[in-house]
Image (tube, coloured by chain):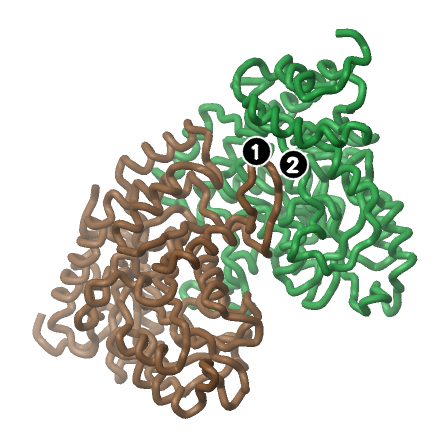
Chain colours: A green, B brown
C-alpha cells in the first residue's frame, strides 16, 4: 500500500484484520492452558475453596518471585487492593490524593471510600501516565509544605498521597514522580492494576512506591476471575494489610477478637488456584503481547495520521492494551472508527472519560489537563488478547 | 448413661463423639458432589471466569427460585452485600443503625463503611437474634419520631435502619421487628449471611425486610469460595444494586460513563459456577443439617445442665451451626470445654465477643444487654458440617 493513504475507518479495520485475521476479536480475553482446570479441580477436591488454603500462599509467593516485591497480599480485586493501600499509606477523611485525570474510575473511587478527595492532574503524552513536569509545576503553584506535610493552599486540605497509574501497562516516569513525592512529602501508592509484567528500569511496577496494587480481573494480563494484590516492601505495612483484609481478627485458637474495623478482602483459594495456573505461563503471555505490538506496528507502519503506542524509554511494557493514537487532525474520526470496528466484530474502545468529567467528581480540585484532553480524543484501544499471537 | 451425670468437658466430648465418630471434626466444612468440578471446568473452558458470564445469571436465578426473592444480585461476599444493602436502604454518614450486640463483626463494619454508627441492642434467648421486646422498650425510651424519621434523643442522630441477624441460621421474630420498624420509621435490612435455607413462617429469611444479605463463604451452608447476594423485592433498588456493584457504569457500546461512586462488588463467574453446583444439592444439605440437630439432641438428651439449641416457633432453621447452651451454673466450664474439645480434634467455638466490647465499637450507643451477655457466656458451637450426616 502506498505511503500516505487517506486515513479511514476502513483502512484501520483492514490493518487490524491483517494482524488478527478474519474472526471476531475481543479487546482482551484470557488465555488458558490445561493447568487452570487441573489446579482448580485439585482445589475443589481439597475442600479448601475459601479464605484459607495453600493456593493463596502459593499465588502470593509466585507473585513475589515474579515482581520482586518483598510482600504480596492477595485480595478480592484491584479496587480493594487500592483502597487498602491508600488506607495503609495514611490517607484519612478530608485528605486530598493526587490522581491522574486519565484512569479507570476505580482509582478515584478508592480515594472516595476513605472520605478523601481525588485531586486530578495532567498526563504525559508518551506514556499516558501522570505527568511529572505538569505535576511539579502545579504543586509549586498550589501547595506548601510545612511540618512535614503538603497542604493545598486553595482548599486548605492535606495532600497525603499520589497514585501514579501505569496506563495500558506502560510505566510512568517513576524517578521523577518519586522525587516530587519526596520533595513535597507525599506518599506514593502505585496503581499497577494494568501493569503486571511491566518494569521501570528493571524494577517491577507497583514496587517503587510505598505500596502498589495489582488487578487480576478477567480482562487483565492474568486472571483469577476476580482478584487483586497489594505489593509492599514494608513488612509492618504488609502485616497490617493482611490483618485488615481478614476482618482484623487477632490470632487465637477460638476467640473472635477484632482490634480494628477490618474488611472482607482476602482472595478465596479457588481464585488463587486459577491464578497459580496463570502464573505458570505469564512470561509466554507477555511475550505474546509484545509480539502483537510489533505485528500492529508493522501493519500500521506506512499509515499516516496515527501512531501505535510503544513503550516508554528505559521501560519494559507488558503491552496490556494495544493502542493507536490518532493525530489531532484525525480526532474527528474517533467515534466513527469505534463504531465501524465494533460493528465489524473488532472490539475497540476509547480511553476512559477523564474522571473529573463524571458527575461524582466534577467538583474535585484539578490542574489544567491539556494533554489528557488530547489523549482522550485520540487514543483507541484495539484487540489485545495474548491468544492472537499465541495459542497454548 | 444415668440421668443427672455430672457435666464435664469429657462428658460433652463423648456425646459429640457419639454423633461425629472418632475422626477429627471441623466446625463447618463444605460438601461437594461431582458437579462442582464439572461446572467450574465448563466455566474455565468457556473463557468467561470473571465479571461477565452465564453462571452468575444462573446462580441468581436459582437463588430466586429457592428464596422466593423477586430480585437477587450476586456479589463478592456477605460483607459487600450488607454494605450495599445499607447504602440502598438510605443509610448516610452520621446516621445510627440498630445492630444486635451478638453478631459477627461484619454486621457492624458494614455500617461503619458508610460513616454511620452501629447502635447495639439486646438479643432474644430463644433464637439469639435481636430481641423485639427489648428493642421496643429501648426505642420508646431513647428515640422520638418526627417528620417521618426516628431520632436518638440522646445523640441527636437519625436512626435510619435496623439489621436483624438470623444467628446461626435461626430466624429472628420478624413480625414483631417489622412492626417496630414500621412504628418507628426504620428501614429493615436483614443480615441473612448465616440463614440461607431458613424460613420465618414460610418466608425465606432475607426477603422480609427491604433488603437482605446472604453469604457463601467457605463455612456457610453453600459456598462459592467467597461470595454473597443481595435479596430485594423492590425492582428499583435491585436495579441500583446491580448498577452500583458494577462501578456504576452506564450501558453503552463502548463509552466509560459512571454516574455515581460505585463498587467492584460483582461475583466472578467462576465463583458462581461453584455456587450453581452447590445449589443443586441445597435441599439435601439442609436435610443433613436437620438430621444432625436431631442426632445431637438425642445424644445430649439425658444430660443435665445444657440444651441443644433448637429452632424458634413457626420457623424452619437451616441449623447452620449447631450449638449447646450451658445453664448459668455451668458457665464457668465454657473455656475448659472449648480447650478440651479442640484439643481432642473436635472443632468448637464460642459465640462472637459482643461487638461493643471490641475497641472500635466501645464508644457506640447501646441498650442494656443482659441476655446477650448470658448467651456470650453460655453458647458453644459444635461440629456442624452437613457431611457428618450425609456424604454424596
Q: In which quarter of the image is the N terminus of chain A?
A: top right
Say few, some or many: other residues with alpha carbon within 10 Å of mark 1 (under 14 / 14 to 19 / 20 or more): many
Q: Mark 1 points at which residue?
A: A222
Residue A50 location, x and y as percent?
42, 48
Q: Is residue A209 left or right of residue A270?
A: right
Question: Which residue is under mark 2?
Answer: A196
Pointer 2 with pointer 1, Cβ within 8 A:
yes
Secondary element under disc 1, as helix, strand or loop, is loop
* Residue at image location 24% in from the left, 80% down from the top: B327
Q: Can residue A52 be seen in this view?
A: yes
In front here: B6 or B109? B109
Q: Can residue A236 be seen in this view?
A: no
**Location of residue A220 in the rendering, given as x and y in whole percent from the top left corner:** 59, 35
Chain ID of residue with mark 2: A
Q: Mark 1 lies on which chain?
A: A
Marks 2 and 1 belong to one chain: yes
- Which residue does the image show at 15% across and 74% down from the upper left? B303
Which residue is farthest top? A1
The 10 Å Cα crowd at callout 2, few under 14, some 14 to 19, many 20 or more, is many
Q: Which residue lies furthest to the bottom in this view?
A: B141
**Cα distance, mark 2 to mark 1?**
8 Å
| Image position of A376 (left or right of A180) | left
Instruction: Tell which residue pokes out farthest to the left in this image.
Output: B2
Where in the figure is residue A47, as x and y percent of width and height? 35, 44
Residue drawn 81% across the image and 13% down it: A4
Percent position (x, y) of residue B248? 55, 51
Amino acid at each position: 500500500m502506498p505511503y500516505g493513504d487517506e486515513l479511514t475507518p476502513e483502512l484501520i479495520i483492514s490493518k487490524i484484520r491483517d494482524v488478527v485475521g478474519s474472526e471476531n476479536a475481543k479487546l482482551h480475553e484470557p488465555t488458558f492452558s490445561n493447568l487452570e482446570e487441573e489446579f482448580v479441580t485439585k482445589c475443589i477436591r481439597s475442600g479448601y475453596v475459601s479464605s484459607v488454603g495453600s493456593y493463596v500462599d502459593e499465588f502470593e509467593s509466585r507473585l513475589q518471585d515474579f515482581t520482586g516485591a518483598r510482600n504480596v497480599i492477595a485480595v478480592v480485586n484491584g479496587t480493594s487492593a487500592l483502597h487498602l493501600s491508600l488506607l495503609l499509606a495514611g490517607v484519612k477523611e478530608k485528605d486530598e490524593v493526587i490522581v491522574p485525570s486519565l484512569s479507570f474510575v476505580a482509582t478515584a473511587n478508592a480515594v472516595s471510600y476513605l472520605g478523601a478527595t481525588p485531586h486530578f492532574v495532567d498526563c504525559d503524552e508518551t506514556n499516558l501516565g501522570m505527568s511529572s513536569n505538569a505535576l511539579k509545576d502545579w504543586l509549586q503553584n498550589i501547595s506548601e509544605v510545612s511540618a512535614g506535610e503538603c497542604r493545598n493552599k486553595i482548599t486548605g486540605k492535606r495532600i497525603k498521597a499520589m497514585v501514579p497509574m501505569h496506563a495500558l501497562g506502560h510505566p510512568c516516569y517513576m524517578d521523577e514522580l518519586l522525587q516530587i513525592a519526596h520533595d513535597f512529602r507525599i506518599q506514593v501508592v502505585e496503581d499497577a492494576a494494568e501493569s503486571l509484567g511491566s518494569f521501570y528500569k528493571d524494577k517491577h511496577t507497583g514496587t517503587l512506591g510505598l505500596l502498589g496494587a495489582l488487578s487480576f480481573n478477567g480482562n487483565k494480563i492474568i486472571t483469577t476471575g476476580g482478584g487483586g494484590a497489594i505489593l509492599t516492601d514494608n513488612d509492618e505495612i504488609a502485616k497490617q494489610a493482611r490483618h485488615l483484609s481478614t476482618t482484623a481478627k487477632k490470632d487465637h485458637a477460638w476467640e473472635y477478637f477484632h482490634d480494628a474495623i477490618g474488611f472482607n478482602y482476602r482472595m478465596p483459594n479457588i481464585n488463587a488456584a486459577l491464578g497459580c495456573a496463570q502464573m505458570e505461563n505469564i512470561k509466554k503471555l507477555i511475550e505474546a503481547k509484545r509480539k502483537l505490538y510489533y505485528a500492529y506496528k508493522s501493519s500500521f507502519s506506512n499509515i499516516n495520521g496515527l501512531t501505535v503506542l510503544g513503550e516508554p524509554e528505559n521501560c519494559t511494557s507488558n503491552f496490556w492494551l494495544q493502542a493507536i493514537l490518532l493525530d489531532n487532525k484525525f480526532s474527528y474520526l474517533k467515534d466513527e472508527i469505534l463504531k465501524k470496528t465494533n460493528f465489524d466484530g473488532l472490539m475497540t474502545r476509547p480511553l476512559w472519560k477523564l474522571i473529573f468529567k463524571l458527575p461524582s467528581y466534577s467538583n474535585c480540585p484539578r490542574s489544567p489537563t491539556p494533554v489528557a484532553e488530547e489523549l482522550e480524543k485520540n487514543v483507541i484501544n484495539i484487540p489485545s488478547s495474548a491468544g492472537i499471537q499465541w495459542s497454548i
